[in-house]
Amino acid sequence: MVEKTKTLRILLADDHVTVRHGLKLLIDAERDMKVIAEAGDGKEAVQKARELNPDVIVMDISMPGVSGLAATRSLKKIQPDAVIVTLTRHGDSAYLKELLRAGVSGYVLKRSAPTELLHAIRAAAAGGQYLDTTLTAGITAGLAGKDARARMPATALTEREAAVLRLIASGYSNKEIAAKLSLSVKTVEAHKANAMRKLDLTGRIDIVKYAVLQGWLDNA
């Protein structure tokens, strides 16, 4: 007997009704997702998140009254395990850094392909993190320049571990990295796990941030 796939319960928070409608159509079209509620501002988002305990909250940032950032901070204090995916038109480093500090599990730009949001929702629901793929070469390069003086030492990593992290941060999959470095996928996964353990990194966003601080993506 085939086990039924769990349906992810999604809360949508965006002040534009038309945007919410489009997102609901997109999400509900997926077999493993369903929008269970909508919110038009940050205050309502926090309230409904507390009442319904959704699997994932898709949170716009620029909303009237209580903003998405303020709502995220408030909700993470009340429910530290809340899973929040940011959906925003803002692609600058200031927003990214503040939202990462606030504890979001995903950061997706509204101008990106719809699949970015779906990937982010699934990754966040599985306990991972997701950063919009269009941000790696843009925002992270800017971050690297600003945080150059705060670069973390990479001496704890072996040459292979550093190479694997660098390629992950640049958007390559484990399979692609294995091909590039002439390794097996299992070996790549082992190098990734060892590097993340040594550096106390918890997900892809942390890897990208580490790569930024090392200056690895300056010429990406």
Image (cartoon, rainbow, N blue to C red):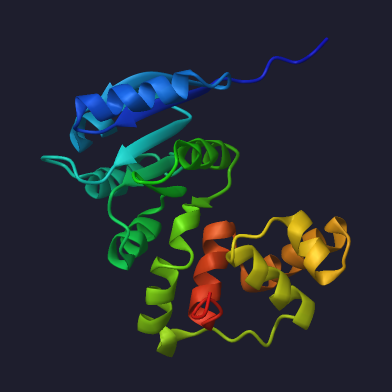
126 w.r.t. 156: above or below: above
163 w.r.t. 202: above or below: below
Q: x, y (%) of residue 1?
A: 83, 9
Front residue of 198 and 144: 144
The quarter of the displayed image where residue 173 is located: bottom right
Q: x, y (%) of residue 109?
A: 37, 48
Q: In the drawing, does residue 170 fall left or right of residue 25?
A: right
Is residue 50 visible to the viewer in this orientation of the structure?
Answer: no
Task: Spot the residue most to the top.
Answer: 1
Q: x, y (%) of residue 158?
A: 77, 81
Q: In the drawing, does residue 139 fall left or right of residue 169?
A: left
- Say which residue appears at 33% left-offset and 29% top-offset: 12
The quarter of the displayed image where residue 171 is located: bottom right
The quarter of the displayed image where residue 156 is located: bottom right
Is residue 220 visible to the viewer in this orientation of the structure?
Answer: yes
Q: In the drawing, does residue 210 fall left or right of residue 21?
A: right
